[in-house]
Image (cartoon, coloured by chain):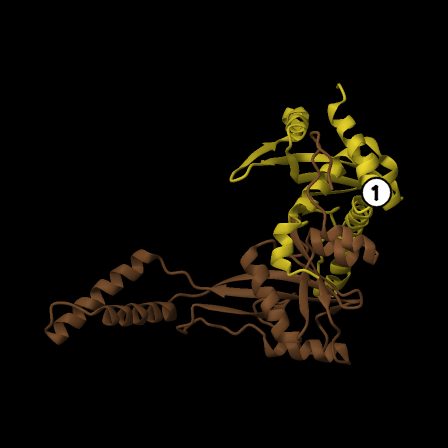
Chain colours: A brown, B yellow
Amino acid sequence: MGLLSASNSITRYRVEGRLKTPVLETVAAGLKKNAIGEIDDQALEKAVGWTSYAKPYQPDFRGSNYAYGAYLVFALRIDKKSISPGVVKKHFAIESSRHLAKSGRHYLSRNEKQTIKDHVIDRLNVKVPATPHVYDIIWNYEDSVLWFFSNLKTANEELETLFLRSFDLTLIRVIPYTAAYLDSGLTDTEKDILINLSPTDFTGKKSV
Amino acid sequence: MLDIAVAYNRFKFLGDEFLTWLWFVIEQDLAVLKNADPDLTSFEIGSRMVVEKKYKKTVERITIKAKDAGLAEARMALKNGAMVTELNLVYRSAQHKWQFSLKGESLNLSSLQTPKIAPPESPDEMEASVLEKIFLYDKILQFLEKLYKHFIKLRTSNRWNSREISLIKKWLNAER
């Protein structure tokens, strides 16, 4: 979902650490180094990388075209190929028969079956175009805040991994605990109380 | 600081309590909302609410379409030990309206609709549109962050046990 869409989902992060200055150059290097690569016509099943917000299908990080005012705006792209199990089954059966006919044997070993299956999947992957999924990102570097426009678990996990690899910075997801511990201005005493909290019972018994 | 995966499960109840408290505040304590945002015109329960009662091994989940069924069923569930786990909310500031769903365990926002902006008609207008949209996201997120801070300060204070719980219980049990 694009950040300009009428309806959106947002996962919030706090960014731990600071970049080497000049910041824009460091960001550009991280984006370029891990920009999405095309996997159509290749045996690869999945690709994950950064792409431009404005041109998600032609990533371009030249200049500082990802800087919008004080914000860094770009996107995570996950390209994935999907082959139906039925197609794999069909091609596996054809390939297995050919293999048996060629060798004159009546059965295949488990290893041979796996090798044939891998070969079939690789060959099909070359023919199948990848479906791109684009998730926009807004990074307020000064405030160490990042918004990711998806709540999908797998997309969030890919983001956290790629972000660390690209910028050597850790993303801390804003969840009830981190929002309380890091962003609520609690004193040390209040943090100690927080750690020991247990659920409130609104039906009768008293909470801790 | 605790490991995030451990903390997610250990403290997701805090997010559910936040939503439950938020509903109470929306109905009973406008001053808290106004303190978080002086520009606020209104803040109300939107089209959907999810309440859950957790048992040892199972969870009983009730989804209420607020507009259709009213909230009596949700209130009854809370009196019986359930908590609000997801809330659709409508926030208004001046003539503008934001609507979104907030999930307790993650504090994630979904179905977030901000006031409409004019779509960019050329690449040159893109930056202005993006910045305008960021401003609109920031407005609602800052409001929620302030409310959560207020809740956490209250939750870690003596006032929670000495006063707030009984006020919430009184609100839940009030005749309507």
Q: Nearer the viewer, residue A164 or A181?
A: A181
Residue B118 in view here: no
Q: Nearer the viewer, residue A52 or A148?
A: A148
Return the x and y of residue B147 as percentages of the image width and height.
80, 46
Q: Residue at left 63%, top 53%?
A: B8
Q: Chain of mark 1?
A: B
From the viewer's perspective, is residue B66 above or below residue A117?
above
* Quadrant in which the N terminus of chain B is drawn: bottom right
In the image, taking residue B134 as reference, residue A60 lies left or right, namely left
Return the x and y of residue B100 as percentages of the image width and height.
69, 43
Which residue corresponds to mark 1? Answer: B158
* Quadrant in which the C terminus of chain B is drawn: top right
Return the x and y of residue A70 as percentages of the image width and height.
80, 67
Mark 1 element type: helix
The amino acid at mark 1 is Asn
Q: Nearer the viewer, residue B60 or B87?
A: B60
From the viewer's perspective, is residue B38 above or below residue A53?
above
From the viewer's perspective, is residue A105 above or below residue B129?
below
Q: Residues within 10 Å of mark 1 (few under 14, many from 20)?
A: few
Q: Residue at left 15%, top 67%?
A: A107
Residue B83 in view here: yes
Q: Residue at left 25%, top 64%?
A: A92
Q: Residue at left 54%, top 39%?
A: B56
